Amino acid sequence: MRTIAALVIALFSLSVFAAEPAKPAAASAATYIEGKDYILLDAPVRPHDPSKIEVAEVFSYLCGHCFEFEPLVSAWAKTQKTDVSLVPVHASWSEAMAPYQRGYYTAVLLKVKDKSHQAIFDKIHREGKELATAEAWAEALSAHGVTKQAVISSYNSFVVSSMVAQADQRVLGYKISSTPELIVDGKYRISSRLVGSQKAMLKVAQFLVDKTRAERATKK
């Protein structure tokens, strides 16, 4: 009898497991909608390096939201594959913003941007410093391995003026009116006004980076 009872229990157990529905697959990655979560530009802006998936970060040193966003976007960029390029673009649409835009591109020209970028943000937003003149930028950037004279000469140079003009044209093409915003592959514009937060901006950016990568793979 014990043997028969054991067989019945075993058969019942098998029937229960067989009848149990399969567990659903893990939820797929979030999908974002054009016009709701990001904007497709009418006229794409050519990336600096079309071989990369460019993520342009439009910012201003004077922007408090940009100061908050910088650690987030920098950390995000470090997680990306080598086919992704984060390209900061300093915007300026007022006289107050212009010296900061010129100072940023001076740091780029002198190849100290990577060392000075966060420090400049801190100097402005933590220390309350104004960097509205070439001399003020010379003082700030000289802490990062360049001479004050090199900064002053570069700040007023034709090369920096050209870089500023190119940035202005890119911002105009992006149709940006506030900062920070992200542009993926020169055609997808992402704003916290649409998605609600800076962290959400990066989630949408990741979605569009993956989308662009997949589209490029099908064309090879």
Image (spheres, grey):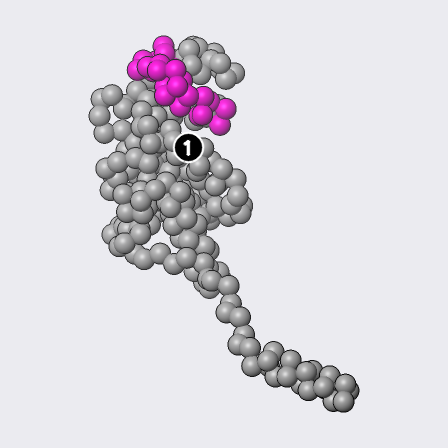
Asked if residue 80 can be seen in this view, the reply is yes
Q: Quadrant of residue 174?
A: top left
Residue 43: percent from the left, percent from the top?
26, 50
The amino acid sitting under disc 1 is Glu
Residue 97: percent from the left, percent from the top?
27, 24
Q: Quadrant of residue 139?
A: top left
Residue 146: percent from the left, percent from the top?
49, 15
Location of residue 48 with respect to 164 vertically, above or below: below
Q: Check disc 1 and report the residue beneath it.
A: 70
Residue 43 falls left or right of residue 160? left
Q: Is residue 166 highlighted in magenta?
A: no
Determine the main secondary structure of the stretch shown in magenta.
helix
Q: Work out whether residue 161 or residue 131 is closer to the camera in this orientation and state it.
A: 131
Tally of numbered tags: 1
Q: Which residue: 54% across, 74% down?
A: 22
Q: Which residue: 38% across, 26% down?
A: 105
Which element type, helix, strand or loop, lies under badge 1?
helix
Check disc 1: other Cα within 10 Å, few if <14, some if 14-19, many if 20+.
Answer: some
Residue 100: percent from the left, percent from the top?
33, 22
Location of residue 148 with respect to 159 vertically, above or below: above
The quarter of the picture where the N terminus appears is bottom right
Q: Work out whether residue 11 or residue 73 is closer to the camera in this orientation and state it.
A: 11
Q: Work out whether residue 56 or residue 38 is closer to the camera in this orientation and state it.
A: 38
Residue span colored magenta: 114-137
Asked if residue 167 can be seen in this view, the reply is no
